[in-house]
Image (spheres, helix red, strand yellow):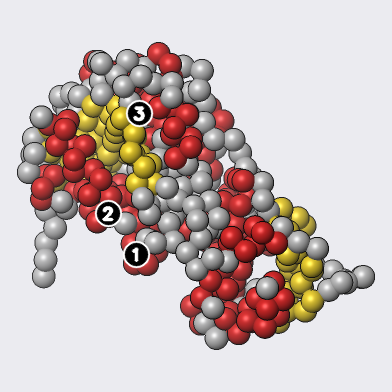
Amino acid sequence: MHDEVMIDTLARLVNDDPAIVRWGRRMNETFMVEVGEEQYLIKVAEGKISVEKGPFTQRAWRFAIRAKRDAWKKFWQKTPAPGWHDLFGLLRRGDVKFEGDQRVLMAYLQYVKQVLAAPRKA
Amino acid sequence: MKLEPIVGRYAHIGKHRIYFEEAGQGIPLLCLHTAGSDGRQYRAVLNDAAITKHFRVITFDMPWHGKSSPPAGWQNEDYRLTTASYTVMIMEFVRELGLERPVVMGCSIGGRIVLELALRHARELRALIGLQTGAYVERYYDPSWLDHPEVHGGRACGAVAYGLMSPLAPEADKWETVWHYMQGGPGVFTGDLYFYQVDGDIRGRIGEIDTSVCPLYLLTGEYDYSASPRDTEAVVARVKGAKFTVMKGLGHFPMSENPEAFVGYLRPVLDEIRS
């Protein structure tokens, strides 16, 4: 399910939605998303993304967002339940970890939130 | 053209120049905005004819917020809201405007301070309404990023506020709520969060609240994870007589993220207070 989301649909859902792309149009960074054990690198170029699946051995990223499969599954529901509807909601529950350069994450927080919530539109 | 009944004025109170808006006549209903935002959040309440028929609805922008000024010399100090400064600000406003036994309704930080008002000023108030009330919230993210020269404060504050709303909120209202957050001055949201996450821990004292002196109504949107229904339940468990309602489909900013749904919950409370 997570490959389907991360590899097959995420880039399309983001790149075809100008309302998401505009929030990231100054962003040129790579960040890591972990869905359970699986790693995905999301490369952002002026708000458009490409996604690559790990495992990776020697790859750099600016920040990483890590959560269990079940947490992402709940986060990606079309209408998520209370507490599962936002990355910071997961943060308060202790169901997500933000690692790496927090400055970049916070600078592009609105964009990152909308990118990672995009699967809800599928 | 449509003119709203809301009128705005400036009041000089102590060292502060305070902007406030009001509409309606009757029992004063003072509305307190959330951290890092301003009184525009209560526009729907001020414009609700069923409410303003019986209530004089008033909302002020706290100093540093909205159209209120920071005091002279603001550039030399960090802004930090405390339980003491917040309480004094509210009660001075009540006294200076001559509001007689007002109802005070606050959201988030405002939902917290109504607990303090219940402890210290119950006899001066007709009723208290806490929206998104919790006695305390631990720091689950680092708010210093909301006040950092290398992070756009408006964008970061907006993104934090965005997530606290319900996915069911109407898009236009949700994004206007975000916009208010984007317009806050540097360090203001963070300074308010000092009260919310540090100084304003009221867990040890809420058991002393006497709701027979001043009724306490608590309304909490179910999608709020900052002051969640569970956080409000913890307050209700310790405050005898507090009346608690969970607002379905609403988040941390009920009055501005979904005004129509919110006034549906507020009107019966105001009817009960009035009767």
Residue A68 found in image quarter? bottom right
Disc 1 from disc 3: Cα separation = 28 Å
Q: Quadrant of the C terminus of chain B?
A: top left
Dot 1 or dot 3, earlier in sequence: 3
> Which mark is in front, 3 or 2?
2
Above or below, B215 against A28 in this view is: above
Residue B114 numbered mark, or none: 3
Q: Chain of mark 3?
A: B
Disc 3 from disc 2: Cα separation = 22 Å
In percent of width and height, residue B43 lies at: 24, 52
Residue that numbered label 2 is attached to? B261
Q: Quadrant of the N terminus of chain B?
A: bottom left
- Answer yes or no: do the residues labelled 3 and 2 have beta carbons within 8 Å? no
Above or below, A14 against B208 in this view is: below
Report if residue B92 is visible in the image.
no
Amino acid on which disc 2 is placed:
Ala
Disc 2 from disc 1: Cα separation = 10 Å
Element type at mark 3? helix
In percent of width and height, residue B195 lies at: 50, 32
Residue A57 found in image quarter? bottom right
Above or below, B211 against B5 in this view is: above
B89 with respect to B75 (left or right): left
Q: Chain of mark 2?
A: B
Element type at mark 2? helix
